[in-house]
Image (cartoon, grey):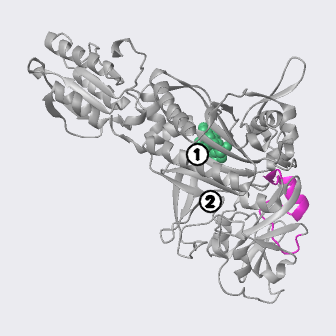
Amino acid sequence: MRYSQLFIPTLREVPAEAEIESHKLMIRAGLIRKFASGIYNFLPLGYRVFRKIENIIREEMDRQGGQELHMSALIPAEVLRESGRWDVFGPEMFKLTDRSSREFCLGPTHEESFTVSVRNEVRSYKNLPQILYQIQTKFRDEIRPRFGVMRCREFIMKDAYSFDRDEAGLDVSYRKMHDAYCSIFDRCGLDYTVVQADSGAMGGSGSEEFMVKSNVGEAAIAYCDDCGYAANDEKAQCVEPSGPAVSKQAGMFEKVHTPGIGSIDDLCGFFDCGAEKFAKTLIYLADGKAVAAVIRGDRDLNETKLQNLLGCVVLEMADPESIRKSTGAEVGFAGPVGLGIRKIMDLEVRHMVNFITGANETDYHLKNVNPADCGNVEYADIRNIASGDGCPVCGSPVKMDRGIEVGHIFKLGTKYSDALGCTYLDENGKERPMVMGSYGIGVARTMAAIIEQNNDSGGIIWPVGVAPYQVIIIPVNTTNEEQVALSEELYSKLIDAGIDVLLDDRKERAGVKFNDADLIGIPVRITVGKRAAEGVVEYKMRRDAKSTDMESGAALDRIRTDLGL
Ligand code: ATP
Ligand code: MG
Protein backbone atom coordinates (compact mmCIF):
# COMPACT_ATOMS: atom_id res chain seq x y z
CA MET A 1 0.00 0.00 0.00
CA ARG A 2 1.04 3.58 -0.60
CA TYR A 3 1.29 5.59 2.57
CA SER A 4 0.03 8.76 0.85
CA GLN A 5 -3.34 7.12 0.25
CA LEU A 6 -3.83 5.59 3.66
CA PHE A 7 -5.83 6.68 6.66
CA ILE A 8 -3.18 6.55 9.38
CA PRO A 9 -3.80 9.55 11.62
CA THR A 10 -0.65 9.52 13.79
CA LEU A 11 -0.30 12.01 16.63
CA ARG A 12 2.81 13.62 18.02
CA GLU A 13 1.21 14.55 21.32
CA VAL A 14 0.59 11.99 24.04
CA PRO A 15 -3.15 11.78 24.59
CA ALA A 16 -4.12 13.07 28.02
CA GLU A 17 -6.55 10.29 28.94
CA ALA A 18 -4.08 7.47 28.30
CA GLU A 19 -2.24 6.19 31.38
CA ILE A 20 -0.31 3.22 30.08
CA GLU A 21 2.14 2.86 27.22
CA SER A 22 0.04 0.57 25.01
CA HIS A 23 -2.97 2.86 25.25
CA LYS A 24 -0.88 5.93 24.41
CA LEU A 25 0.78 4.20 21.48
CA MET A 26 -2.42 2.74 20.07
CA ILE A 27 -3.84 6.24 19.88
CA ARG A 28 -0.64 7.93 18.72
CA ALA A 29 0.00 5.35 16.00
CA GLY A 30 -3.53 5.81 14.68
CA LEU A 31 -4.66 2.26 15.53
CA ILE A 32 -7.75 3.12 17.57
CA ARG A 33 -9.91 6.04 18.58
CA LYS A 34 -12.12 6.37 21.62
CA PHE A 35 -15.81 6.64 20.76
CA ALA A 36 -17.27 6.73 24.29
CA SER A 37 -16.18 5.54 27.73
CA GLY A 38 -14.91 1.98 27.30
CA ILE A 39 -15.85 1.96 23.62
CA TYR A 40 -13.23 2.12 20.89
CA ASN A 41 -13.19 2.10 17.12
CA PHE A 42 -10.42 0.40 15.20
CA LEU A 43 -8.86 2.36 12.35
CA PRO A 44 -7.33 0.61 9.31
CA LEU A 45 -3.82 0.05 10.70
CA GLY A 46 -5.18 -1.20 14.03
CA TYR A 47 -7.66 -3.44 12.30
CA ARG A 48 -4.90 -5.02 10.21
CA VAL A 49 -3.10 -6.07 13.40
CA PHE A 50 -6.39 -7.17 14.90
CA ARG A 51 -7.08 -9.44 11.92
CA LYS A 52 -3.59 -10.91 12.04
CA ILE A 53 -4.06 -11.89 15.67
CA GLU A 54 -7.53 -13.19 14.88
CA ASN A 55 -6.08 -15.35 12.09
CA ILE A 56 -3.37 -16.77 14.31
CA ILE A 57 -6.08 -17.70 16.80
CA ARG A 58 -8.21 -19.20 14.03
CA GLU A 59 -5.35 -21.28 12.62
CA GLU A 60 -4.36 -22.68 15.99
CA MET A 61 -7.95 -23.40 17.01
CA ASP A 62 -8.57 -25.20 13.72
CA ARG A 63 -5.33 -27.15 14.11
CA GLN A 64 -6.71 -28.59 17.35
CA GLY A 65 -9.99 -29.55 15.73
CA GLY A 66 -11.98 -26.46 16.69
CA GLN A 67 -14.87 -25.53 14.39
CA GLU A 68 -15.71 -21.89 13.90
CA LEU A 69 -19.30 -20.71 13.97
CA HIS A 70 -21.06 -17.50 14.84
CA MET A 71 -23.66 -16.92 17.54
CA SER A 72 -25.96 -13.96 17.89
CA ALA A 73 -24.80 -11.22 20.27
CA LEU A 74 -28.40 -10.66 21.28
CA ILE A 75 -29.48 -13.35 23.75
CA PRO A 76 -33.09 -13.93 24.88
CA ALA A 77 -33.49 -13.67 28.67
CA GLU A 78 -35.04 -17.16 28.97
CA VAL A 79 -31.77 -18.80 28.00
CA LEU A 80 -29.90 -17.09 30.82
CA ARG A 81 -32.80 -17.62 33.22
CA GLU A 82 -32.56 -21.36 32.56
CA SER A 83 -28.94 -21.39 33.71
CA GLY A 84 -29.67 -19.03 36.59
CA ARG A 85 -27.27 -16.36 35.33
CA TRP A 86 -29.78 -13.65 34.35
CA ASP A 87 -29.55 -12.23 37.90
CA VAL A 88 -25.98 -13.28 38.64
CA PHE A 89 -24.40 -10.96 36.11
CA GLY A 90 -25.95 -7.92 37.77
CA PRO A 91 -25.22 -4.46 36.40
CA GLU A 92 -22.29 -5.74 34.27
CA MET A 93 -24.81 -7.12 31.77
CA PHE A 94 -26.43 -4.83 29.21
CA LYS A 95 -30.15 -5.65 29.28
CA LEU A 96 -32.75 -4.44 26.85
CA THR A 97 -36.33 -5.08 25.79
CA ASP A 98 -37.80 -5.32 22.33
CA ARG A 99 -40.97 -3.58 21.09
CA SER A 100 -43.10 -6.36 22.60
CA SER A 101 -41.41 -6.00 26.00
CA ARG A 102 -39.50 -9.25 25.63
CA GLU A 103 -36.22 -9.15 27.52
CA PHE A 104 -32.78 -9.66 26.01
CA CYS A 105 -29.19 -9.03 26.87
CA LEU A 106 -26.12 -8.26 24.81
CA GLY A 107 -24.07 -11.39 25.47
CA PRO A 108 -21.30 -10.89 28.05
CA THR A 109 -20.20 -14.48 27.30
CA HIS A 110 -21.85 -17.39 25.46
CA GLU A 111 -21.87 -20.58 27.54
CA GLU A 112 -25.67 -20.75 27.38
CA SER A 113 -25.95 -20.06 23.65
CA PHE A 114 -23.53 -22.86 22.80
CA THR A 115 -25.04 -25.28 25.29
CA VAL A 116 -28.54 -24.70 23.95
CA SER A 117 -27.38 -25.12 20.35
CA VAL A 118 -25.61 -28.39 21.10
CA ARG A 119 -28.50 -29.62 23.27
CA ASN A 120 -30.89 -29.18 20.37
CA GLU A 121 -28.72 -30.95 17.81
CA VAL A 122 -26.41 -33.53 19.37
CA ARG A 123 -28.03 -36.63 20.82
CA SER A 124 -25.56 -39.50 20.59
CA TYR A 125 -22.14 -40.33 22.00
CA LYS A 126 -21.17 -40.92 18.37
CA ASN A 127 -21.25 -37.18 17.75
CA LEU A 128 -18.95 -36.32 20.64
CA PRO A 129 -16.53 -34.71 21.32
CA GLN A 130 -17.11 -31.30 19.76
CA ILE A 131 -15.01 -28.15 20.08
CA LEU A 132 -16.86 -25.11 18.79
CA TYR A 133 -15.67 -21.53 18.75
CA GLN A 134 -16.40 -18.05 17.53
CA ILE A 135 -14.60 -14.74 17.34
CA GLN A 136 -17.33 -12.37 18.28
CA THR A 137 -18.36 -9.24 20.13
CA LYS A 138 -19.02 -9.29 23.88
CA PHE A 139 -20.65 -6.58 25.94
CA ARG A 140 -19.86 -5.96 29.60
CA ASP A 141 -20.72 -2.80 31.43
CA GLU A 142 -17.45 -2.82 33.38
CA ILE A 143 -17.42 -0.65 36.53
CA ARG A 144 -14.03 0.75 35.61
CA PRO A 145 -13.32 0.59 31.90
CA ARG A 146 -9.67 1.57 31.58
CA PHE A 147 -6.42 1.32 29.71
CA GLY A 148 -8.05 1.63 26.29
CA VAL A 149 -8.91 -1.73 24.75
CA MET A 150 -7.48 -3.66 27.72
CA ARG A 151 -10.70 -3.33 29.65
CA CYS A 152 -13.54 -1.99 27.60
CA ARG A 153 -17.28 -2.41 27.47
CA GLU A 154 -17.57 -3.79 23.96
CA PHE A 155 -14.77 -6.14 22.96
CA ILE A 156 -14.12 -9.09 20.71
CA MET A 157 -13.41 -12.40 22.32
CA LYS A 158 -12.51 -15.73 20.87
CA ASP A 159 -14.65 -18.05 22.93
CA ALA A 160 -14.60 -21.79 22.55
CA TYR A 161 -16.63 -24.50 24.23
CA SER A 162 -15.92 -28.20 24.34
CA PHE A 163 -18.49 -30.97 24.76
CA ASP A 164 -17.33 -34.40 25.86
CA ARG A 165 -18.77 -37.68 27.05
CA ASP A 166 -16.86 -37.75 30.32
CA GLU A 167 -14.13 -36.15 32.43
CA ALA A 168 -11.40 -38.05 30.60
CA GLY A 169 -12.68 -36.61 27.33
CA LEU A 170 -12.74 -33.14 28.85
CA ASP A 171 -9.12 -33.57 29.92
CA VAL A 172 -8.19 -34.23 26.29
CA SER A 173 -10.13 -31.24 24.93
CA TYR A 174 -8.76 -29.01 27.68
CA ARG A 175 -5.21 -30.08 26.87
CA LYS A 176 -5.80 -29.30 23.19
CA MET A 177 -6.97 -25.80 24.04
CA HIS A 178 -4.03 -25.33 26.40
CA ASP A 179 -1.66 -26.27 23.58
CA ALA A 180 -3.49 -24.04 21.09
CA TYR A 181 -3.17 -21.10 23.49
CA CYS A 182 0.56 -21.68 23.93
CA SER A 183 1.04 -21.64 20.14
CA ILE A 184 -1.14 -18.55 19.77
CA PHE A 185 0.69 -16.50 22.38
CA ASP A 186 4.08 -17.74 21.15
CA ARG A 187 3.23 -16.63 17.64
CA CYS A 188 2.12 -13.25 19.02
CA GLY A 189 5.63 -12.82 20.43
CA LEU A 190 4.44 -12.64 24.03
CA ASP A 191 6.31 -13.51 27.20
CA TYR A 192 3.56 -15.17 29.25
CA THR A 193 3.03 -17.59 32.11
CA VAL A 194 0.23 -20.04 32.70
CA VAL A 195 -1.15 -19.77 36.22
CA GLN A 196 -3.74 -21.67 38.20
CA ALA A 197 -6.98 -19.75 38.49
CA ASP A 198 -10.12 -19.94 40.54
CA SER A 199 -12.79 -22.13 39.03
CA GLY A 200 -15.69 -20.61 40.90
CA ALA A 201 -18.05 -21.70 43.60
CA MET A 202 -20.39 -23.64 41.36
CA GLY A 203 -18.70 -26.67 39.91
CA GLY A 204 -15.69 -26.57 37.65
CA SER A 205 -12.71 -28.74 38.30
CA GLY A 206 -9.81 -26.70 37.01
CA SER A 207 -8.91 -23.45 35.41
CA GLU A 208 -5.80 -21.70 34.16
CA GLU A 209 -5.08 -18.19 33.01
CA PHE A 210 -2.54 -17.03 30.46
CA MET A 211 -0.82 -14.03 31.97
CA VAL A 212 1.40 -11.63 30.12
CA LYS A 213 3.97 -10.33 32.59
CA SER A 214 3.62 -6.59 32.90
CA ASN A 215 3.73 -4.08 35.72
CA VAL A 216 0.54 -2.50 34.41
CA GLY A 217 -1.31 -5.80 34.62
CA GLU A 218 -4.43 -5.75 36.78
CA ALA A 219 -3.98 -9.33 37.96
CA ALA A 220 -1.67 -10.33 40.80
CA ILE A 221 0.26 -13.58 40.44
CA ALA A 222 1.95 -15.53 43.20
CA TYR A 223 4.80 -17.71 42.05
CA CYS A 224 7.46 -19.88 43.58
CA ASP A 225 10.93 -20.06 42.06
CA ASP A 226 11.71 -23.27 43.91
CA CYS A 227 8.91 -25.54 42.72
CA GLY A 228 7.38 -23.62 39.81
CA TYR A 229 3.99 -23.07 41.46
CA ALA A 230 2.10 -20.12 39.96
CA ALA A 231 -1.43 -18.99 40.65
CA ASN A 232 -3.43 -15.80 40.51
CA ASP A 233 -4.27 -14.15 43.80
CA GLU A 234 -7.89 -15.28 43.69
CA LYS A 235 -6.69 -18.85 43.75
CA ALA A 236 -3.31 -18.83 45.55
CA GLN A 237 -3.82 -20.62 48.80
CA CYS A 238 -2.43 -19.13 52.03
CA VAL A 239 -0.96 -21.71 54.36
CA GLU A 240 -1.93 -21.62 58.02
CA PRO A 241 0.97 -20.56 60.27
CA SER A 242 2.67 -23.68 61.57
CA GLY A 243 2.46 -24.91 65.12
CA PRO A 244 -0.55 -25.05 67.40
CA ALA A 245 -2.61 -21.93 67.93
CA VAL A 246 -1.73 -20.23 71.20
CA SER A 247 -4.70 -20.73 73.44
CA LYS A 248 -5.02 -17.76 75.70
CA GLN A 249 -7.88 -17.86 78.07
CA ALA A 250 -10.92 -15.79 77.29
CA GLY A 251 -12.01 -12.62 79.05
CA MET A 252 -8.70 -10.78 79.37
CA PHE A 253 -9.73 -7.99 77.02
CA GLU A 254 -10.49 -4.41 78.01
CA LYS A 255 -12.63 -1.74 76.40
CA VAL A 256 -10.87 1.38 75.15
CA HIS A 257 -12.53 4.66 74.22
CA THR A 258 -11.56 5.47 70.62
CA PRO A 259 -13.74 8.46 69.73
CA GLY A 260 -14.25 8.80 65.97
CA ILE A 261 -11.28 6.52 65.24
CA GLY A 262 -12.40 3.73 62.99
CA SER A 263 -9.83 3.29 60.22
CA ILE A 264 -6.83 1.00 60.63
CA ASP A 265 -4.44 3.88 59.87
CA ASP A 266 -5.90 6.12 62.58
CA LEU A 267 -6.05 3.21 65.02
CA CYS A 268 -2.36 2.42 64.44
CA GLY A 269 -1.61 6.02 65.45
CA PHE A 270 -3.91 5.89 68.45
CA PHE A 271 -2.62 2.59 69.82
CA ASP A 272 0.91 3.28 68.61
CA CYS A 273 1.33 -0.12 66.98
CA GLY A 274 1.41 -1.76 63.54
CA ALA A 275 -1.65 -2.88 61.58
CA GLU A 276 -0.74 -6.54 62.24
CA LYS A 277 -1.88 -6.09 65.85
CA PHE A 278 -5.48 -5.70 64.73
CA ALA A 279 -8.09 -8.17 63.59
CA LYS A 280 -10.29 -6.21 61.23
CA THR A 281 -13.87 -7.22 60.80
CA LEU A 282 -15.55 -6.61 57.48
CA ILE A 283 -19.29 -6.97 57.19
CA TYR A 284 -20.57 -8.41 53.92
CA LEU A 285 -23.99 -9.24 52.55
CA ALA A 286 -24.06 -12.73 51.07
CA ASP A 287 -27.26 -12.96 49.02
CA GLY A 288 -28.56 -10.26 51.35
CA LYS A 289 -27.56 -11.96 54.60
CA ALA A 290 -24.93 -10.30 56.83
CA VAL A 291 -21.71 -12.19 57.52
CA ALA A 292 -18.51 -11.04 59.18
CA ALA A 293 -15.07 -11.70 57.70
CA VAL A 294 -12.18 -11.27 60.10
CA ILE A 295 -8.60 -10.90 58.90
CA ARG A 296 -5.36 -9.49 60.26
CA GLY A 297 -5.31 -5.68 60.03
CA ASP A 298 -2.53 -5.50 57.44
CA ARG A 299 -4.07 -8.12 55.14
CA ASP A 300 -6.47 -7.84 52.22
CA LEU A 301 -9.62 -9.85 52.10
CA ASN A 302 -10.02 -12.12 49.08
CA GLU A 303 -13.63 -11.81 48.03
CA THR A 304 -13.42 -14.76 45.64
CA LYS A 305 -12.30 -17.10 48.42
CA LEU A 306 -15.01 -15.77 50.71
CA GLN A 307 -17.70 -16.12 48.06
CA ASN A 308 -16.61 -19.67 47.21
CA LEU A 309 -16.74 -20.57 50.89
CA LEU A 310 -20.18 -19.07 51.40
CA GLY A 311 -21.48 -20.46 48.10
CA CYS A 312 -23.54 -17.32 47.58
CA VAL A 313 -24.54 -15.84 44.24
CA VAL A 314 -24.05 -12.18 45.15
CA LEU A 315 -21.44 -10.99 47.66
CA GLU A 316 -21.26 -7.29 48.43
CA MET A 317 -19.88 -5.08 51.16
CA ALA A 318 -22.63 -4.21 53.60
CA ASP A 319 -24.09 -0.71 53.51
CA PRO A 320 -23.84 1.44 56.69
CA GLU A 321 -27.43 0.67 57.65
CA SER A 322 -26.88 -3.11 57.50
CA ILE A 323 -23.64 -2.68 59.45
CA ARG A 324 -25.46 -0.74 62.19
CA LYS A 325 -28.15 -3.40 62.29
CA SER A 326 -25.79 -6.35 62.64
CA THR A 327 -23.14 -4.79 64.92
CA GLY A 328 -25.12 -2.18 66.83
CA ALA A 329 -22.40 0.34 66.00
CA GLU A 330 -21.40 2.83 63.34
CA VAL A 331 -19.02 1.78 60.54
CA GLY A 332 -15.48 1.23 61.86
CA PHE A 333 -16.28 -0.39 65.20
CA ALA A 334 -17.21 -3.95 64.26
CA GLY A 335 -15.48 -6.85 65.98
CA PRO A 336 -15.96 -10.58 66.46
CA VAL A 337 -16.55 -10.53 70.23
CA GLY A 338 -20.24 -10.96 70.92
CA LEU A 339 -21.20 -10.40 67.30
CA GLY A 340 -24.37 -12.28 66.54
CA ILE A 341 -23.91 -13.05 62.84
CA ARG A 342 -22.02 -15.77 60.99
CA LYS A 343 -18.30 -15.18 61.48
CA ILE A 344 -15.59 -16.38 59.13
CA MET A 345 -12.13 -15.90 60.52
CA ASP A 346 -8.93 -16.14 58.52
CA LEU A 347 -6.64 -19.02 59.49
CA GLU A 348 -3.95 -16.58 60.51
CA VAL A 349 -6.16 -14.93 63.14
CA ARG A 350 -6.39 -18.27 64.96
CA HIS A 351 -2.69 -17.79 65.79
CA MET A 352 -2.93 -14.18 66.94
CA VAL A 353 -2.52 -13.24 70.57
CA ASN A 354 -3.80 -10.17 72.42
CA PHE A 355 -5.06 -8.34 69.39
CA ILE A 356 -7.28 -5.27 68.97
CA THR A 357 -10.77 -5.35 67.46
CA GLY A 358 -13.86 -3.18 67.28
CA ALA A 359 -16.19 -3.45 70.29
CA ASN A 360 -19.47 -3.41 68.34
CA GLU A 361 -20.14 -0.15 70.12
CA THR A 362 -19.63 3.23 68.47
CA ASP A 363 -16.35 4.87 69.52
CA TYR A 364 -15.02 1.79 71.33
CA HIS A 365 -12.43 -0.87 70.64
CA LEU A 366 -11.30 -3.89 72.60
CA LYS A 367 -7.66 -4.68 73.29
CA ASN A 368 -6.05 -7.93 74.43
CA VAL A 369 -8.63 -9.97 72.56
CA ASN A 370 -7.90 -13.64 71.83
CA PRO A 371 -9.63 -16.17 69.58
CA ALA A 372 -11.24 -17.76 72.65
CA ASP A 373 -13.18 -14.51 73.12
CA CYS A 374 -14.77 -14.68 69.73
CA GLY A 375 -17.32 -17.42 70.33
CA ASN A 376 -18.54 -19.45 67.43
CA VAL A 377 -16.34 -18.81 64.42
CA GLU A 378 -15.43 -20.72 61.26
CA TYR A 379 -11.77 -20.67 60.27
CA ALA A 380 -10.85 -20.54 56.59
CA ASP A 381 -8.35 -19.10 54.15
CA ILE A 382 -10.02 -15.85 53.10
CA ARG A 383 -7.13 -13.45 52.57
CA ASN A 384 -4.90 -12.52 49.66
CA ILE A 385 -1.52 -14.16 49.55
CA ALA A 386 1.40 -11.72 49.94
CA SER A 387 5.05 -11.72 48.95
CA GLY A 388 7.08 -13.84 51.36
CA ASP A 389 4.17 -16.09 52.39
CA GLY A 390 4.87 -19.80 52.20
CA CYS A 391 4.27 -21.56 48.89
CA PRO A 392 1.28 -23.90 49.28
CA VAL A 393 3.19 -26.66 47.51
CA CYS A 394 6.75 -26.53 48.86
CA GLY A 395 6.71 -23.91 51.61
CA SER A 396 9.40 -21.64 50.14
CA PRO A 397 8.57 -17.91 50.20
CA VAL A 398 6.47 -16.89 47.20
CA LYS A 399 7.03 -13.79 45.09
CA MET A 400 4.34 -11.61 43.62
CA ASP A 401 4.17 -10.31 40.07
CA ARG A 402 1.63 -8.48 37.96
CA GLY A 403 0.11 -9.83 34.79
CA ILE A 404 -2.34 -9.03 32.04
CA GLU A 405 -4.85 -11.85 31.70
CA VAL A 406 -5.09 -12.49 27.96
CA GLY A 407 -6.64 -15.93 28.01
CA HIS A 408 -8.58 -18.21 30.31
CA ILE A 409 -9.27 -21.92 30.01
CA PHE A 410 -11.81 -23.52 32.24
CA LYS A 411 -13.14 -27.00 33.00
CA LEU A 412 -16.83 -26.37 33.49
CA GLY A 413 -17.87 -29.96 34.10
CA THR A 414 -21.62 -30.41 33.92
CA LYS A 415 -22.70 -27.08 35.39
CA TYR A 416 -24.33 -25.80 32.20
CA SER A 417 -25.30 -29.13 30.72
CA ASP A 418 -27.16 -30.02 33.93
CA ALA A 419 -28.86 -26.65 34.13
CA LEU A 420 -29.84 -26.57 30.46
CA GLY A 421 -30.46 -30.28 29.92
CA CYS A 422 -27.64 -30.80 27.44
CA THR A 423 -27.47 -34.60 27.47
CA TYR A 424 -26.51 -37.42 25.13
CA LEU A 425 -27.24 -41.14 24.94
CA ASP A 426 -24.25 -43.37 25.72
CA GLU A 427 -23.46 -46.80 24.18
CA ASN A 428 -26.09 -48.40 26.45
CA GLY A 429 -28.77 -45.88 25.58
CA LYS A 430 -28.40 -44.20 28.96
CA GLU A 431 -28.88 -40.42 29.10
CA ARG A 432 -25.87 -38.52 30.46
CA PRO A 433 -24.94 -34.85 30.77
CA MET A 434 -22.19 -33.64 28.46
CA VAL A 435 -18.99 -32.59 30.19
CA MET A 436 -18.00 -29.11 29.12
CA GLY A 437 -15.08 -26.70 29.00
CA SER A 438 -14.89 -23.04 28.05
CA TYR A 439 -11.93 -21.15 26.67
CA GLY A 440 -11.59 -17.39 26.05
CA ILE A 441 -9.07 -15.00 24.56
CA GLY A 442 -9.48 -11.23 24.42
CA VAL A 443 -8.25 -10.28 20.95
CA ALA A 444 -7.74 -6.54 21.51
CA ARG A 445 -6.38 -7.07 25.01
CA THR A 446 -3.82 -9.42 23.47
CA MET A 447 -2.92 -6.68 21.00
CA ALA A 448 -2.45 -4.13 23.81
CA ALA A 449 -0.38 -6.66 25.78
CA ILE A 450 1.89 -7.19 22.77
CA ILE A 451 2.51 -3.43 22.66
CA GLU A 452 3.17 -3.29 26.42
CA GLN A 453 5.96 -5.80 25.97
CA ASN A 454 7.26 -4.47 22.65
CA ASN A 455 7.90 -0.75 22.54
CA ASP A 456 10.57 1.88 23.03
CA SER A 457 10.66 5.67 23.19
CA GLY A 458 10.12 5.80 19.41
CA GLY A 459 6.94 3.75 19.41
CA ILE A 460 5.70 0.22 18.83
CA ILE A 461 7.99 -2.66 17.82
CA TRP A 462 5.65 -5.22 16.28
CA PRO A 463 6.70 -8.87 16.37
CA VAL A 464 6.77 -9.95 12.71
CA GLY A 465 3.79 -12.30 13.01
CA VAL A 466 1.32 -9.56 13.89
CA ALA A 467 2.78 -6.44 12.25
CA PRO A 468 0.26 -4.46 10.16
CA TYR A 469 2.88 -4.30 7.42
CA GLN A 470 6.07 -6.31 7.54
CA VAL A 471 8.26 -3.96 5.52
CA ILE A 472 8.27 -0.21 4.94
CA ILE A 473 10.17 1.33 2.03
CA ILE A 474 11.19 4.94 2.48
CA PRO A 475 12.51 6.92 -0.47
CA VAL A 476 14.43 9.79 1.13
CA ASN A 477 13.76 12.20 -1.68
CA THR A 478 10.55 11.65 -3.66
CA THR A 479 11.67 14.03 -6.38
CA ASN A 480 14.79 12.00 -7.13
CA GLU A 481 14.05 9.71 -10.07
CA GLU A 482 16.59 7.01 -9.18
CA GLN A 483 15.32 6.76 -5.62
CA VAL A 484 11.71 6.61 -6.78
CA ALA A 485 12.49 4.01 -9.44
CA LEU A 486 14.38 1.71 -7.06
CA SER A 487 11.69 2.10 -4.38
CA GLU A 488 8.98 1.21 -6.88
CA GLU A 489 10.94 -1.80 -8.11
CA LEU A 490 11.43 -3.15 -4.59
CA TYR A 491 7.82 -2.41 -3.78
CA SER A 492 6.45 -4.47 -6.65
CA LYS A 493 8.89 -7.32 -6.01
CA LEU A 494 7.78 -7.51 -2.38
CA ILE A 495 4.12 -7.41 -3.36
CA ASP A 496 4.76 -10.24 -5.84
CA ALA A 497 6.45 -12.20 -3.06
CA GLY A 498 3.28 -11.88 -0.96
CA ILE A 499 4.87 -9.65 1.65
CA ASP A 500 2.83 -6.91 3.37
CA VAL A 501 4.71 -3.85 2.28
CA LEU A 502 4.13 -0.16 2.78
CA LEU A 503 5.71 2.40 0.43
CA ASP A 504 6.08 5.77 2.11
CA ASP A 505 5.60 7.89 -0.99
CA ARG A 506 4.57 10.98 0.98
CA LYS A 507 6.26 14.25 0.13
CA GLU A 508 7.52 14.63 3.68
CA ARG A 509 10.98 15.12 5.10
CA ALA A 510 12.84 11.84 5.64
CA GLY A 511 12.95 12.53 9.41
CA VAL A 512 9.16 12.67 9.58
CA LYS A 513 8.87 9.38 7.71
CA PHE A 514 11.44 7.67 9.94
CA ASN A 515 9.57 8.82 13.03
CA ASP A 516 6.27 7.54 11.70
CA ALA A 517 7.82 4.22 10.66
CA ASP A 518 9.17 3.83 14.21
CA LEU A 519 5.91 4.90 15.81
CA ILE A 520 3.78 2.44 13.83
CA GLY A 521 6.42 -0.20 14.47
CA ILE A 522 7.04 -1.81 11.07
CA PRO A 523 9.63 -4.60 11.63
CA VAL A 524 11.82 -3.99 8.54
CA ARG A 525 12.72 -0.57 7.15
CA ILE A 526 14.36 -0.12 3.75
CA THR A 527 15.62 3.37 3.11
CA VAL A 528 16.32 4.27 -0.49
CA GLY A 529 18.63 7.28 -0.50
CA LYS A 530 21.85 8.66 -1.99
CA ARG A 531 23.20 5.31 -3.18
CA ALA A 532 20.07 4.39 -5.14
CA ALA A 533 21.94 4.86 -8.42
CA GLU A 534 24.32 2.03 -7.38
CA GLY A 535 21.35 -0.13 -6.38
CA VAL A 536 22.30 0.12 -2.70
CA VAL A 537 19.74 0.59 0.09
CA GLU A 538 19.87 0.95 3.87
CA TYR A 539 18.43 -2.02 5.75
CA LYS A 540 17.25 -1.68 9.32
CA MET A 541 15.22 -3.80 11.69
CA ARG A 542 12.94 -1.80 13.96
CA ARG A 543 14.43 -3.60 16.96
CA ASP A 544 18.03 -2.76 16.07
CA ALA A 545 19.74 0.59 16.49
CA LYS A 546 21.96 0.30 13.44
CA SER A 547 21.27 0.08 9.73
CA THR A 548 23.37 -1.71 7.11
CA ASP A 549 23.97 -0.73 3.50
CA MET A 550 23.37 -3.54 1.02
CA GLU A 551 22.48 -4.29 -2.58
CA SER A 552 18.74 -4.25 -3.13
CA GLY A 553 18.84 -7.95 -4.11
CA ALA A 554 20.57 -8.83 -0.85
CA ALA A 555 17.96 -6.78 1.00
CA LEU A 556 15.20 -8.91 -0.49
CA ASP A 557 16.97 -12.07 0.70
CA ARG A 558 17.49 -10.60 4.18
CA ILE A 559 13.78 -9.81 4.42
CA ARG A 560 12.93 -13.47 3.88
CA THR A 561 15.29 -14.49 6.67
CA ASP A 562 14.18 -11.78 9.08
CA LEU A 563 10.51 -12.49 8.52
CA GLY A 564 11.11 -16.20 8.93
CA LEU A 565 9.79 -17.01 5.45
P1 ATP B 1 -10.98 -9.88 33.93
O1 ATP B 1 -10.69 -10.62 35.21
O2 ATP B 1 -9.79 -9.19 33.36
O3 ATP B 1 -12.20 -9.02 34.01
P2 ATP B 1 -12.54 -12.07 33.04
O4 ATP B 1 -12.16 -13.10 34.01
O5 ATP B 1 -13.78 -11.31 33.21
O6 ATP B 1 -11.32 -11.00 32.88
P3 ATP B 1 -13.18 -13.95 30.98
O7 ATP B 1 -14.62 -13.85 31.21
O8 ATP B 1 -12.45 -15.18 31.35
O9 ATP B 1 -12.44 -12.67 31.58
O10 ATP B 1 -12.91 -13.58 29.44
C1 ATP B 1 -11.94 -14.19 28.62
C2 ATP B 1 -10.97 -13.17 28.08
O11 ATP B 1 -11.63 -12.03 27.53
C3 ATP B 1 -10.04 -12.57 29.13
O12 ATP B 1 -8.97 -13.43 29.36
C4 ATP B 1 -9.63 -11.27 28.48
O13 ATP B 1 -8.57 -11.49 27.57
C5 ATP B 1 -10.85 -10.86 27.70
N1 ATP B 1 -11.63 -9.81 28.40
C6 ATP B 1 -12.44 -9.98 29.47
N2 ATP B 1 -13.01 -8.81 29.82
C7 ATP B 1 -12.56 -7.88 28.94
C8 ATP B 1 -12.79 -6.49 28.77
N3 ATP B 1 -13.62 -5.83 29.56
N4 ATP B 1 -12.15 -5.84 27.76
C9 ATP B 1 -11.32 -6.52 26.92
N5 ATP B 1 -11.07 -7.83 27.04
C10 ATP B 1 -11.67 -8.52 28.02
MG1 MG C 1 -14.16 -9.44 34.03
**As shown in the figure, which amino acid type bears the numbered disc 1?**
Gly
Is ligand 1 less than 8 Å from the beta carbon at label 1? yes
| Above or below: residue 396 compared with residue 317 | below
Q: Position of residue 519 (x, y in %)?
A: 35, 31
Disc 1 versus disc 2: distance between alpha carbons?
16 Å
Which image quadrant: the C terminus?
top left
Give the residues drawn in magenta, as a range: 313-339
Disc 1 target residue:
407
- How busy is the neighbourhood of tag 1: few (under 14 within 10 Å), some, or many (20 plus)? many
Q: Find numbered disc 2 in the image and state the secondary structure of the residue it sits on.
A: loop
Residue drawn at the location 68% of the way across and 27% of the way down: 70
Camera-side mark, 1 or 2:
1
Q: Quadrant of residue 252?
A: bottom right
Question: As drawn, is 20 to the left or to the right of 383?
Answer: left
Q: Find numbered disc 1 in the image and state the secondary structure of the residue it sits on.
A: strand
Q: Position of residue 51 (x, y in %)?
A: 50, 28
Disc 1 vs disc 2: Cβ atoms closer than 8 Å? no
Residue 6 drawn in magenta: no
Q: Find residue 233 and name its label.
A: 2
Q: Closer to the camera, 477 or 76? A: 76
